[in-house]
Amino acid sequence: MQLVTVFRSFSPAEAQLIRSRLDAADIPAEVVNELAALSMDGYSMATGGILVQVPDDYAEEAKALIEAANDSSG
C-alpha cells in the first residue's frame, strides 16, 4: 500500500481539518510533517508543507471530496 499526498498546507489546523473530513467519509488519512513544522519556524516550507496522505486506493475519492468541500466553501 502506497500513500499518496492529496492535500498540502502550511497550516496544521487546515491539514487536520482535511484529515478529519476524510476520516468522517471513511477514508483513512494521516498528516505528515506536522510536528516538524511546529517545532521549527520555516521548516514546513523547507519540507514542502504539511501533507495529508491516504492509501492510493482512496486517492481519487479523497481528492474529489476535498475539491467538493473547497467549491462549497468558496
Image (spheres, rainbow, N blue to C red):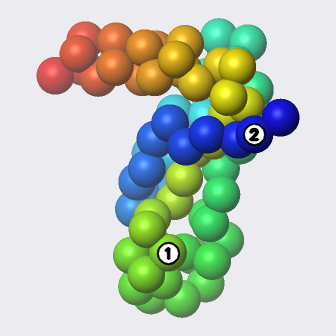
- What element does badge 2 sit on? loop
User: Which corner quadrant of the image does residue 16 belong to?
Assistant: top right
Counting from the top left corner in percent of width and height, residue 26 is at: 73, 12
Residue 37 in the image: above or below residue 21: below
Counting from the top left corner in percent of width and height, residue 44 is at: 47, 74
- What element does badge 1 sit on? loop
Q: Quadrant of the N terminus?
A: top right
Residue 46 in the image: above or below residue 72: below
Q: What is the crowding at mark 2: few (fewer than 14 residues within 10 Å), some, or many (at least 20)?
A: few
Q: What is the crowding at mark 1: few (fewer than 14 residues within 10 Å), some, or many (at least 20)?
A: few
Q: Nearer the viewer, residue 55 or 15?
A: 55
- Residue drawn at point x = 49 percent, y = 75 percent: 47
Residue 67 in the image: above or below residue 56: above
Q: Looking at numbered disc 2 in the image, what kind of residue is underneath it?
A: Gln
Q: Residue furthest left?
A: 74
Counting from the top left corner in percent of width and height, residue 7 is at: 46, 41
Q: Residue furthest right?
A: 1
Q: Nearer the viewer, residue 40 or 3?
A: 3
Q: Which mark is residue 47?
A: 1
Asked if the residue under mark 2 is in contact with the one under mark 1, i.e. CB atoms within 8 Å, the reply is: no
What residue is shown with label 2? Answer: 2
